[in-house]
Amino acid sequence: MAFQTPITIREAVEQIHAKRYSLPAIQREVVWSTDQIQRLFDSLMRDYPIGSFLFWHVERARTGNYQFYEFMRDYSDWDNQHNAKANVTGQDDIIGVLDGQQRLTALYLGLLGSYAYKEPWKRWTNAAAFPKRRLHLNLLSSAGEDSDLQYDFQFLTDAEAKAADDDTYWFRVGEVMNFKKQVDVNNYLIKSGLMQRSQEKATFANGTLFKLREILHDAKTINYFLEKDESLDKVLQIFIRVNSGGTVLSYSDLLLSVATAQWKKLDAREEIHGLVDRLNQIGNGFAVDKDMVLKAALVLSDFKDIAFKVDNFNKSNMLKIEANWDAISGALLDAFELVASFGFNRDTLTSNNAVIPIAYYLMKRGLPKNYSQDKKQAADRARIQKWLILSLVKRSFGGKPDNVLTPNREVISANNSEFPLDAIRAKFRGGTKSLDFTGDEVENLLESRYGQPYTFSLLALLYPTLDFRNLFHVDHIYPRSVFTQARLLKRGIKATDIPSFIERVDSLPNLQLLEGIPNQQKSDSDFADWFKDTVKGATAQADYVSKHFIPKIDYKLANFGTFFEERKALLREQLQMLLGVAKAPTSKP
């Protein structure tokens, strides 16, 4: 390994653009956010060091022995998160990047690429929620006192970049690649009218743009070492050594790197990333990542130690995972299909790790592909659903999930003729991960509120007979839109009652599960009117009242307080029964 003559950022980015720099398959994918990229460019503008780099030289004659990937050019959370495979059949040697991929990728995305991330309040299933953004620099003012950055770098859409005022002029950073000479900066400043601004603004624009050009074209910023040993084992050890000293590279990244290097028949990187994508497309979508898939691979392979420790990722373990990959991936797909049939998605499944014991059970029992719909398995599915809900509501997988995954696996391994709900509860009884509930815990559950991640799980427990393959919404029984100070006063509610009305509207006793279409039809209707007009006939009304734990009172708005307390009592009784909690003794008068 030898230190090489430093190069400029422009030279490095041009090498990436020409596909002369590639990424060994052991490298992970893009993980830096736009904030991190902006911070990197700010550091460069302030002459802060950005660290050294480690490159790997592979002669053309041996490039076919390894798998390489291209750098990310246009990242998108919607449809472009994975690096493309590199074509190494050309006439040139390959330079692989062992240390510095994230920094080089950030430089490329900021200068020649783009970054698309989801806009808030838009659905993950909406492609328009992920507009393409390019890095821009404000040439008229700094980042401001509320920021620890000095220069105002931001990723903006084309429309956002057109916004301009006395303190704002957005310059697309990539344009500076064309400023080969200093006179190009002057020409741009004149052409854009920036030199006609006030002296203070013109001076700032001049200094900022000249500085940006300097760090890109003139400064020898990329200091790197070059490794020429082509032994993959040595390169892997170098990679682990330089990346495991801090928290930048997770152990799951290292596991994926080792698997990629040591699998013989399958491409671990493509298999694992492909499985993550397939899992996230099930039902209404999940938020699975490679960490969860790799953890599941360790659990489902029956390794005694399932911790993310480099020493455990030896060649024999990696080959066992490869040999079992079809069974592992199939079990995970079946498990998430089952969890989706319970109504869960990325917003309501509060722990992806909770699906791993389900996958282990499905694999051990060898259940058929139609398990989630087989009527003969309804009772077994109900046990799985209850275990999942109890685990989520109890937050059993918080903290160190290994302390929950291993005991669950032990019980399932010894009892898999049916899902061993009772045996699992017995295993954890008395410990910090117990699935048993106390009366106080039930009272806390009754305080759950709309929008909280565990509220759906609790409602699903209360509605065990619903077919969640249909879309269900968490509905406010008394419509939320009415519960404002002005509207309640207008409806004749006493001013002294209004604070408690508003406080209670989002609480569990005012929430129910309702199918999507009926919920849309109900919309903001008064509950009394909707119940009378929609739930017609004594039989239908009795069924609705029973299924939704609705007290039999007058449902006019003024009675909301009474409704709330009586439904809370009904829910308390139901939860105590479902969770096996003894009722508190009532004192005699």
Image (cartoon, rainbow, N blue to C red):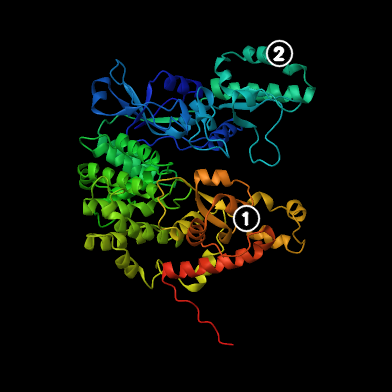
- Single out the mark in the foreground, 1 or 2: 1
Q: Earlier in the sequence, mark 1 or mark 2?
A: 2
Judging by the rendered image, the residue that carries numbered circle 2 is 190
**251 w.r.t. 198: above or below:** below
Can residue 398 be seen at all in this image of the molecule?
A: no
User: Dot 1 lies on which element?
Assistant: helix
Judging by the rendered image, the residue that carries numbered circle 1 is 528
Q: Is residue 410 left or right of residue 487?
A: left
User: Dot 2 lies on which element?
Assistant: helix
Kindly indicate the quadrant of the structure image that contains residue 422: bottom left
Measuring from the top left, give residue 571's x and y in whole percent: 51, 65
Picture quarter with the C terminus: bottom right
Query: Between marks 1 and 2, how big is the CA–CA gap?
Result: 69 Å
| Total tally of numbered discs in the picture | 2
Number of residues whose C-alpha sits closer than 10 Å to that of mark 2, classed few (under 14), some (14–19) or many (20 or more): few
Measuring from the top left, give residue 492's x and y in whole percent: 76, 57
Measuring from the top left, give residue 78's x and y in whole percent: 47, 32
Q: Nearer the viewer, residue 36 or 179?
A: 36
Q: Nearer the viewer, residue 277 or 334?
A: 334
User: What amino acid is found at the position of numbered circle 1 in the picture?
Assistant: Ala
